[in-house]
Amino acid sequence: MRYSTHPTPLLEREHWRDLGGLWQFCYDDEARWRHPGEVIFDRQILVPYAPESRKSGIGDEGFHPVVWYSLTVTLTPEERSGRLLLHFGAVDYRATVWANGSVVAQHEGGHTPFTADITKQAQAGETVEIVVRAEDDPQDLAKPRGKQDWQREPHSIWYPRTTGIWQTVWLERVPETYLRRVRWSSNMQSWEIGLNVEVAGPLPPHMSVRVRLYRDGELLADDRYAVRHTEVSRQISLADPGIDDFRNELLWSPAHPQLLDAQVDLLVGDRVIDRVRSYTAMRYVAVHGNRFLLNGRPYYLRMVLDQGYWPDSLMTATDDELRQDVELIRRLGFNGARKHQKIENPRWLYWCDVMGVLVWEEMPSPYRFTPQAVKRLTREWEEVLERDISHPCIVAWVPFNESWGVPDLPTNPAHRDYVRALYHLTKTFDSSRPVIGNDGWEHVATDILTIHDYADDTEALRRRYGTIESTRLSLEQQQPADRAITLGGFEVMGQPVVLSEFGGIAYIPNHESGWGYSESQSEVDFLQDYAALLAAIHDCHGLSGFCYTQLTDTFQEKNGLLYEDRRPKADMLKLAKSTQGNRTAREMTIDPVLNPYGNSPRWLNRQREPLVLAETAED
């Protein structure tokens, strides 16, 4: 598996340029200006960091509903020929983009990408002035906003806001006709890789798509298909190795995150006019009875809640920081992460693909139920599915969390219908993954029954979830946060049960301000409390997995296994042993968590600079 540095590793071209750096910037609190010619830029900002962050060079967490950006780009000769695309990873919340005074893009949705074709503007001269207006009402609770606080100071479980550009901005040169999108899927039963290609631009005669798949440099497939329309869908058959030991060498899992390199060429005759590099994997996820399945075998989920915030840069991180977080998840003994109320940078998903971390992807919530909120969430969720559907690490979709945005689920049929609608819409987009309609409680449509239970009484947890029978009884009687786990009309049919939030033990040295769901008084106590809690969870045979709260301290929440700067709060090997628990028959897939990359860490070859692992222990 080659190392990728591209902002979108699933669709990588050679000719691209990162536009991160100093841009001109200003606030427009009264929304006075409508055109770039009217704007008075009075400061600079470091893109792609939000102005609320210290790393942006501004660090203003006040209410600023409209912001403006400007950058003049000197184009290379190559960028002034052919077609030039301007990409935005994410702009929160409503963006308008000008190039040399002409509107080239408008987009609504703070977590999903969009692209502007600036070919005409690029061909007009040697420079292009890019101007961005971002509108983001800090108190609008009807838009998907995740953990962004509507109050001036972060409170309770909410954090500082993010306004404007917060993911990568880049230029990319493409031909007149180019590969707009490549989508992958896999079918382990028939031993096939699914390929869907979308082509943009005019379609000349004799056009074809050629796809080559490689495993560690070995050619597995070399197929070519005629292009008759703007979309090509095919199934690429691979030779079935047959016996499991041989199959496992090709299958992707946390124990063996085998990725398949792909090269996709667009040709006219025998002439290549566009080429992208990508990757995929052969893997299968499903639920069967009360178990989650990975590659056809029961697999026990050991996940951690990941908020995706950094103290100086808020929701934005460097690639090294994203990579470090994925490595820390594995070193702490987890095989998965629930990215909470955030659609993370695709680079994080890339590292989860590379290092073998299972991901539950969760849509950031609005906090009101209105027709406008319904339209906004639905539209942006579709864009999320479109962006990330090809990542093998994603094993579940979560459109709602804890009834946020649908607060009257028990009493309002419209709220229940909306959760069901998003559940079925997601299944329509992607039938290959489980969907959790509303994570935590008040289930009306779900493939996995999830529970948020922060009880710190280990014996109470064993009583509730220790056996399949007690777990079923708890589904009927237990009401965490005074919420029923299922609502009338939803039929419990033996679905897997996952404790998708629990723990939250705070260890706060030096009596700093902050909170957790329980508190340890010393590092020794913290290790003991975590060990006792995880031992109880591992004794709960009614569960198919868990998600511990949480990976890092996050602002006022001090319940992380790591501090905000990613320093561990206690010995990582001891924490990992507690996370892993004792081997049981429930987890059929070999997963050497304490040394997650094995004795031959092939993953190190996938990076420019190998990371140094801490000392590891034997299972």
Image: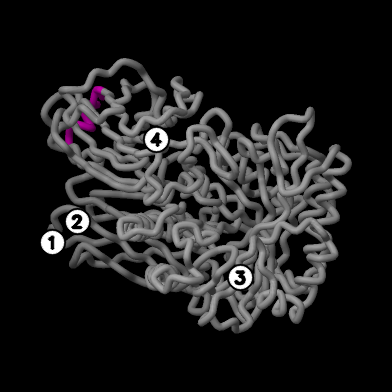
**Which quadrant holds residue 590?**
bottom right
Describe residue 572's horizontal placement relative to residue 42 as left or right. Answer: right
Measured in 3D between alpha carbons, the distance from the residue under mark 1 to the one under mark 2, in whole angstroms, is 7 Å
Q: Residue at image x 48%, y 47%?
A: 344
Q: Residue at x 82, y 53 (%)?
A: 577
Query: On the image, numbered disc 3 is attached to which residue?
Result: 484
Q: Residue at the spot x=27%, y=53% of the render?
A: 179
**Residue 260 pos. (x, y %):** 50, 58
Image quadrant where residue 27 sits? top left
Q: CA distance from mark 4 to mark 3?
A: 36 Å
Kind of residue at disc 4: Thr
Q: Is residue 498 left or right of residue 29?
A: right
Q: Which sits earlier in the primary sequence, circle 4 or circle 3?
A: 4
Q: Which residue is mark 4?
A: 163
Distance between the alpha carbons at the discs numbered 3 and 1: 60 Å
In what quadrant of the picture does the C terminus appear?
bottom right
Mark 4–mark 2 distance (CA, rounded to whole Å): 44 Å
Residue 512: horizontal and vertical position, in percent? 73, 30
Residue range highlighted in magenta? 72-81
What amino acid type is highlighted by mark number 1?
Pro
* Residue occupying the point 45% across, 62% down: 406
Q: Mark 2 packing: few (<14 Cα in 10 Å), some, or many (20+)? A: some
Dot 3 or dot 1, earlier in sequence: 1
Cα gap from disc 3 to disc 2, whole angstroms? 60 Å
Residue 76 is inside the magenta segment: yes
Which residue, given by chain and number where applicable, does mark 2 sit on?
268
In space, the residues marked 1 and 4 are separated at their CA atoms by 46 Å
